[in-house]
Image (tube, rainbow, N blue to C red):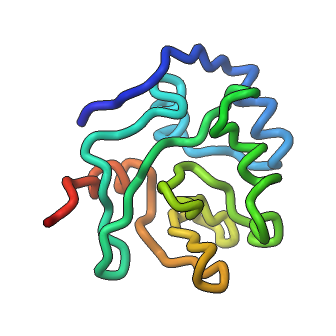
């Protein structure tokens, strides 16, 4: 797996600030990747969700001012604040891969803003999401 990314320096303080504002403890596997590849673009970048290939365009950012800053995504995405989901990656069309912390164990879902803000189960962990990435099938 390769990442295309800027060399953002994500500090523990930046992570703590976002975590505190969202009142969430992000899983360690997610944070270890964010610290290295904040706002990065994975290669390969496709995940099969409910039989459809969806693109993981880029990870969210923990750096204020970045176009993918996690808190801005939540604030600016129509109807998202009411979803109780936390975005971790974007596709190219305004849909989001998110942590769903509504149950005891977090899981990752695909939030589709075009279909009545629906959410579809993807996997149980960020590590599992990365393992699911593949090249888009023609």
What residue is rendered at 52% in x and 61% in y? 93
> Which quadrant, please, contains the C terminus?
bottom left
What residue is rendered at 74% in x and 59% in y? 77
34 or 114, nearer to the observer: 114
The image position of residue 24, as x and y in percent, is 74, 49
Q: Quadrant of residue 76?
A: bottom right
Horizontal side of residue 84 vs 51, given as left or right: right
What residue is rendered at 28% in x and 53% in y? 133
Q: Quadrant of residue 21?
A: top right
Farthest residue toward the right?
Answer: 21
- Up the image or down, 67 lies above or below 85; here it is above
Farthest residue toward the left?
Answer: 138
> Which quadrant, please, contains the N terminus?
top left
Number of numbered discs on residues: 0
102 or 6, nearer to the observer: 6
The image position of residue 99, as x and y in percent, is 59, 59
- Up the image or down, 51 lies above or below 44; here it is below
Farthest residue toward the bottom?
Answer: 116
The image position of residue 54, as x and y in percent, is 37, 65
- Up the image or down, 135 lies above or below 102; here it is above
What residue is rendered at 69% in x and 26% in y? 63
- Up the image or down, 138 lies above or below 16; here it is below
Horizontal side of residue 71 vs 48, given as left or right: right
The image position of residue 91, as x and y in percent, is 48, 56
Q: Quadrant of residue 5?
A: top left
């Amino acid at each position: 797996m390769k990442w295309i990314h800027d060399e953002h320096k994500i500090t523990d303080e930046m992570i703590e600030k976002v975590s505190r504002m969202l009142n969430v403890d992000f899983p360690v596997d997610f944070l270890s990747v964010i610290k290295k590849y904040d706002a990065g673009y994975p290669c390969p970048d496709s995940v099969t969700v409910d039989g459809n290939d969806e693109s993981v365009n880029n990870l969210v950012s923990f750096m204020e001012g970045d176009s993918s800053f996690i808190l801005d995504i939540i604030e600016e995405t129509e109807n998202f604040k009411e979803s109780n989901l936390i975005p971790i990656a974007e596709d190219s069309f305004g849909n989001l891969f998110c942590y769903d912390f509504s149950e005891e164990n977090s899981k990752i879902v695909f939030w589709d803003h075009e279909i009545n803000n629906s959410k579809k189960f993807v996997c149980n962990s960020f590590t599992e999401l990365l393992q699911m990435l593949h090249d888009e099938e023609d």
